[in-house]
Structure formats: structure tokens, C-alpha cells
Image (cartoon, grey):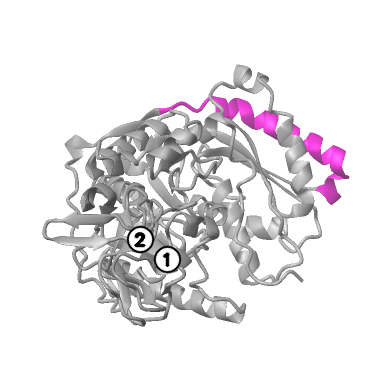
Amino acid sequence: MENFTDYALLLHDRDDVAVMKRPVSRGMKLVSGSASVVVSQSIPRGHKLAIRSIPKGNPVRKYGQIIGFASQDIGAGSHVHSHNLEARNFGRDYEFCVDARSVDYVPPEQMRTFRGYLRPDARVGTRNYVAIISTVNCSASVSRYAAERFRGPELKRDFPNVDGVLALTHKTGCAMPLDEPTKVLQRVLAGFARHPNVFGYLIIGLGCECNQVPVLVQNHGLNVLRPGEPGPAFLTIQEVGGVVKTVEAAVDAVRKLLPLANEARRSHQPISKLVLAEECGGSDAASGITANPALGLASDELVRFGGTSILSETPEVYGAEHLLTRRAVSRQVGEKLIEFIHWWEDYTRRNNATIDNNPAPGNKEGGLTTIYEKSLGAVAKGGQSPLAAVYRYAESIHTPGFGFMDTPGYDPVSMTGMVAGGCNIAAFTTGRGSVYGCKPVPCIKIATNTPLYERMADDMDINAGDILDGSATLRDVGLRILEKIIAVAGGERTRSELHGMGDEEFAPWQLGPTL
């Protein structure tokens, strides 16, 4: 006979399942007060135990919300997972705005600061890069060749205030429709060009691609300079005269930018200038219990200081979107989110897929069974602040407070969209272990459980597993995350930055067919 709370965690009094804190074996009896449950089969850590009998077809609840339906009769003490739990469509009451509450803003005299780079447009950078941006895959190698000329220790010696020369390359830009797919790519490229973490940039194309340099420049006003902004260079390989000549022209343009970028200095800036990208990847059952709600608490605190926090991954709020619409500041904001939900339902249907074809194998091994369960844990990153704005992919983020951006669930594509929108710092929760980096934006990794943190200590910045271990509260870890956000924004290096990660993770969302 064992104490139930030593082995299992019941998240809500309406729940039909508990989450295992430790593995249990068949025949173990878990007792809580006068109630008890006998385990009918071995259940791994992070997986679900039925605390009562659930008839076939009945909804199964976790977090007090529906995570799926019993595909067969489930007895008390059973392991609940993909063999007996399935996702089915069910109605959600969106109840727009009913839970939107006013923000308890921190008084101005209590404003926190970080040391950032004040830019001409009044935004603030947390890093100071020079970027070489490819319009098309055909100019990717040239962009990389140019950036590699600035990889040595001489860069830091000669330009100590410059974080690096970054080549932003991708696999698209041509053989694509000129409507929405090209518009999305251009929003991304322009967003990175004008990003507060990018002091100056140059753009390189081939010359004959669909995503033409002059069109990108004209559509996004990249030839219109703000006071104090360095003029960019626009190059096309065909016009310059081939690979070697274009590399040399790009290197020359970067050399002109570097001394100017090196003159930039950090100064004390209010943390209201921080725009936080929230991401989760390689999730497990602990994600929605530890790291995600702790990040949500940090998000709420940042919003209280007048800052901005962005949640994303529309397919991974599916089944939990009603929790966001209830917090919308207006019906219009809530309905914009639902429009994106319906777009994804149609998009997956047209591509002979289903939006609930998720979680991934690693998620399932970690204890997550359905997209509804994964989504309920994922939205916890958004805390409890009112939903102030909803954005298209890579759209410029303009409203302070908590917002949502429509992105796919694939981490690099999602993060690329939020950074393009203007996020200048990122926090990434992971339960299975992600090694993601995100130049030009620093990315803080938060482990959901202590075994992961200890196993991948070189890659994790914070351990939220302390919450499950009982050595820290949710608030303790949430405030620890906020302090790390402020420190990293001011120049402290993340683990992924120390490893040099982030050059390969630029991944614009590719919409439409390849023609």
C-alpha cells in the first residue's frame, strides 16, 4: 500500500486520470484518504492512470478539460494512452471575453530595466548583428560564403560590440505562387531585415527568381531609411557578374557596416520593450505541469511591466482555443483566432490529413496521447493575461500585452514567424530535449523535468523539474524565468548561444505548391 500523492498527481478535481510522478507496477495499491486504486498494469513516469472506470465513448478529462474519448471500456487503475484513448471532434463554447480581466500594471516608478540597444524606430535590441539575407535558395551559398569571411576571432577582436555576421538562407524563393506564399516569405525577410537585433543588412538575390529583390524592397519600404539607420546594399548575382564578384561585393558591404554596428552601445531600457516569443518543443507530460505554466507566470509578470508576450502554433492550441477566446479583450480578437482554427481544419482536410494527427512519437513516449492533451498543456505558456491581439504569420507585432500569432506547430517555422514579427527574446520549454538556437534572438531553454535537465545540462538554461520534485513552487520557477529573461536580454549568453546554435534554424513557412 502506497501513498497516492507520492506516485501520482491529480491536476483537477474533475479529472478522470492522474499523471504518474514515478513509475508504478501492476498490483500496487495507491491510497489517498479513504479512497484507493489498484494499478492493473505497469505505467511509466509521465503517463496517465485512470482513477475511476470510464465507459467506452465517454470523455476523458485532465486539467479539468476534455483530452479525448475512451475507445474502449477503461477500468480504474488502467494505463490510459493511445491504446484506449482517441481524439474525436467535440463542440467548444468560445464564450468570447468572459474571462478577460484588467492587467494589474506595475507602477512606473517600479519599472525594471535591462541593458539593450535603442534603435532609430524606438524598438530595443537584445543583440547586435549584421545580416546577409537571401531572397532565394539560389543565392544561399553566396550569402554563406560572404558570412563565413567573418567567422574568425578577428571579428570579436576588431568589433567587440557586434554579435556576429548572420547569413539568413532558406530553400524557397522561386517556383512558387506570387500571391500569398510569396507575400509570407517577403514578410519574413523584411521582418528580419528590420529586426531590432539587426543593426544593418544586405539582401542578395540571383536575379531571375519569383521573389524579386526590387519587389521585396518596394513592398516593404526597405529603401526608406529612418534617421540614423545605415543604408542597406541590394545585390543580384546575375547583375554583379557571378559568384566570386558577388561574394566580394557582399564582403565589402559588410565591412562598411561593421564599424557602424560596433558604435552601438547598450543602455538601460525598460523591460516594457521586451517582446517574448514563447515556444515548446519535444514536449512531455510534465510540460503542462511545470515549465509551461511557469513560463506563463513569467509572461504575466512581463505583461504587468508593459511588455509583450506571444504564443503561437495554431495546430497546438487546437482543442484548447476556447480557453483563449474567453480571455480575448474583444469579440473581434477572439473571432480572428477562430478564423485561423477553421483555416487549419480546412488546410489539413485539403491535404488529406487531420489536425489531430499529433502528438509526435516522442511526445507520446513522454506520456502525451492526443492533440487536445498537448494543446491544454501548451496554452499554459500564455499565463492568464487578456488576449490583446492576434496576428498573421510574421506580421509586425504592435500591441503590448499577451498576443497570439498564427504559425504551424513545427518549432523552427513557428519561431521564425515570431522573430520576423519583432520578438527580441525567446523562451523554449522542452520535456524530451531540444537543442534549438535562434539567431539573431537569444533563446532560453527550460527543462520540464530534472532527469532531462541533468542529462542535457549543457543545453538547458533553467530546470522547471524542481516543481515536480517539490523543491520549488510554480511561482518560484516563474520568477526565476523572468529574471533569466531580463539577464539574457541584457547580454548574458544562453546555452544555445554558447554552442553557436542558430545559423540553420531560419525556416520561413512554405505555403502552396512548388511549381
Judge from the rendering whether residue 8 lies leftward or rightward of residue 71; answer left or right: left
| Residue 188 visible to an observer of this rendering | yes
Residue at 69 percent across and 23 percent down: it is 152
Q: Which residues are magenta?
A: 237-266
Residue type beneath disc 1 = His
Circle 2 residue: 48
Q: Residue at x 50, y 41 (%)?
A: 441
Residue at image coords 48%, 35%? 455
Tell me, for residue 81, which label it has, or none: 1
- Is residue 53 rendered to the left or right of residue 489? left
Q: Secondary structure at mark 2?
A: strand
375 vs 28, nearest the viewer? 28
Q: Pointer 2: residues within 10 angstroms few (<14), some, or many (20+)? A: many
Q: Is residue 150 left or right of residue 123?
A: right
Tell whether label 2 touches label 1 (CB within 8 Å). Answer: yes
Q: Position of residue 496 (x, y in %)?
A: 53, 35
Residue 124 visible from this viewpoint = no
* Amino acid type, callout 2: Lys
Q: Quadrant of residue 71?
A: bottom left
Residue 241 among magenta residues: yes
The alpha-carbon separation of the residues under discs 1 and 2 comes to 7 Å
